[in-house]
Image: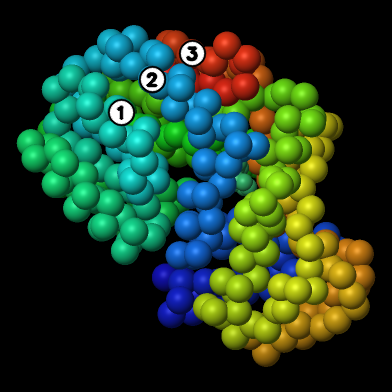
Amino acid sequence: MNESETASGIAAEEILKGLQRPQKSLPSKYFYDERGSELFEQICSLPEYYPTRTEISILTSNMSDISRTIGKGIDLVEFGSGSSLKTRMLLDHLKDLHVYYPVDISEAFLMKSADQIRSEYKNLNVIPVPADYTEPFSLPGDLNGERTIIFFPGSTIGNFRPDRASGFLKQHRPLMLPGGGILIGVDRKKPKEILERAYNDEKGVTAEFNLNILNHLNDKLDAAFDPRLFRHKAFYNEEEGRIEMHLVCRADHEVELSGVTVSFMEGESIHTENSYKYSPDEVEALFGEGYRLEAMWSDPDKYFSVYYFRV
Ligand code: AVI
């Protein structure tokens, strides 16, 4: 925990800095308190939100090829808690897997899902790593396999700005040396209507997920946001190739936050998330030197792709 972080793990300074810029913003990592994680789970099964089911269908249709491409004798590091069906699909099919390391910032959630995986895969050595994988971290103990493979599903890479995404991939390359690689799911560019529908679902679950960031700050920081004074907005910014989520202020008002007053004007917004969509060429460019694209699998509509890059 750095000095500016509270006991809750939330950095008040970082938050205030974002809210004091001309375009106000909040870091999207703060979506994921307990309620936010629940709402995200619900988003994943919404009819409008195609990424999750499309990625699962790609994994299902190509699992033997994927497992052959990755090869045997590996340690698997998953960025994310490893609670999903996608994790189980890989664990079921990878040959001669030595250690499985789920890495997640939310320790309670991580330990719960690690216990669950242990009970289902009795012969697998499961070592949960409570860490923020967007920052450098090391794996505990000796790696047992011959090679290390990272699994990074869900197009979470799309929530980083492209320069951050490239930096992130460069930063984690040593973990995969020598001879390892990364299996990564990335959402693709597609017609604006399909993208915008996925982030503006009819039931309003995405709107609740977006607004919940304010409840999270109220709970964990000394903040007094009234979520009723904001509304959800999500749109595709074609020039930037990204979905942007914002919270638009409904009326002029002020909010107290860790002893600082922040003013909001009717119509101005807080930018809460970017979700970049990438063509396969753009994905290759993000990885850059030091990685070689070995294989790519897509759905028939080319909505989503799963890539395997070797170091
Ligand atoms: C986690 N991440 C890949 C999701 C996305 O699509 O960017 C988060 C999300 N935001 C709104 N809906 C889903």
On the image, the x and y values in percent for residue 15 come to: 65, 70
Mark 1 neighbour density, 10 Å: few (under 14) some (14–19) many (20 or more): some
Q: Amino acid at mark 3?
A: Met
Q: Amino acid at mark 1?
A: Met
Q: CA distance from mark 3 to mark 2?
A: 14 Å
Rendering colour mode:
rainbow
In the image, what residue occupies the spot 69% across and 45% down? Answer: 201
The front one of 276 and 135 is 276
From the viewer's perspective, tell me whether residue 203 is left or right of residue 230. Answer: left
The residue beneath circle 1 is: 89
On the image, the x and y values in percent for residue 65 come to: 34, 10
Disc assigned to residue 60: 2
In the image, what residue occupies the spot 53% across and 56% down? Answer: 39
Please say if the residues under marks 2 and 1 sit with CB atoms less than 8 Å apart: yes
Disc assigned to residue 296: 3
Is there any visible trace of residue 286 in the rendered image? Answer: no
The front one of 70 and 114 is 114
The mark that comes first in sequence, 3 or 1, is: 1
